[in-house]
Amino acid sequence: MEEELDLLIKFLKEATIGGVVVDFTVKVAAISANMACRMILGKKYMDHDLDEKGFKAVMQETMQLGATPSRGDYIPYIGKLDLQGLIKRTKELHKIFNDFFDKIIDEHIQSNGGEDKVKDFVDVMLGIVDKAEFEYRIERSNIKAILLDLLAGAMDTSLVEIEWTLSEFNRNPRVMKKVQMELATVVSIKRKVEESDLDKLEYLEMVIKESMRLHAVVTTTTLTEGRLHVWRIFQAIPFWNLWIADDDGCHDGVDVQPMSLWFRVEKIMET
């Protein structure tokens, strides 16, 4: 994983020297895909290995499709008509992922004979396929489903949160300056941040938590009997995935205090 970060840093340095404009979203999407593939699948795969649209576009379409309400769920009689085209798009995505995972599994089966080969997640899953001693039977289709869950979680959610955090840096240069000062003080500018440094970067941690509070990538609230229940994560910091305006009149009787939509890191540090 460190190799991928080194490549990104090298690219950004060269772009800075050359005065080249960088689409950072594309670069973050690429590094997220590369890291996920190397951790889960054992090696790096290019965008065209999955589909001509690339990992980012296919994953975004998958997430969007999964979150789109189907009229057929509410009116079963029109479900087969596929008026929204959801069934057609789902079948297209299924074929893309199915072919990709079949290729990966076949590659691992063919290379399974090497003694010096370092086993990755796919090798471990293949090692328990059709094993009678396990309570649950694992088949090829199960491996594909698990791989899809892991890749989607590693690529999409991480990418979205990184994008929002960087956007908040652009909107709040004062916060970005304080993060830079903390990094220079705790880590220094002469080396990269190591995992052992993370516990000492308190302000950066609060920035990430505040970004996740404002821009949660998954649903973390539920409405039950007219009351809003908030799952409290990260030291009792409420996470929201609902748009609630500051106007008291917008709550319609929901028993909840108005939520500020400002990016206020210091407020979290006081809690």
Image: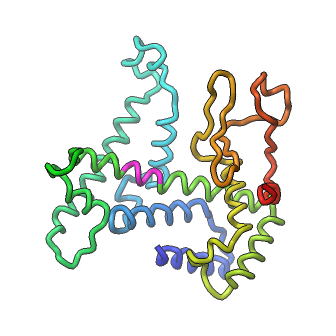
Residue 150 among those drawn in magenta: yes
Closest to the observer, 66 or 129: 129
Give above or below for 86 relative to 161: above
Question: Magenta: predominant secondary structure element?
Answer: helix
Nearer to us in this view, 201 or 60: 201
Q: Residue at x 33, y 62 (%)?
A: 41
* Residue ID at (33%, 67%): 42
The region drawn magenta spans 148-153
Q: Nearer the viewer, residue 88 or 215?
A: 215
Counting from the top left corner in percent of width and height, residue 226 is at: 68, 22
- The answer to if 237 sits in the magenta stretch is no
Vertical position of residue 197 compared to residue 45: above or below: below
Q: Does 187 appear above or below 23?
A: below
The percent coordinates of residue 141 (x first, y second) are: 25, 44
Q: Is residue 199 left or right of residue 148?
A: right
**Which residue shows up at 80% across the image and 71% down it?**
177
Q: Residue at x 37, y 42 (%)?
A: 93
Q: Is residue 116 left or right of residue 62?
A: left
Q: Position of residue 261 (x, y in %)?
A: 79, 45
Quadrant containing the C terminus is bottom right
Among all residues in the image, which is located at the extreme top?
77
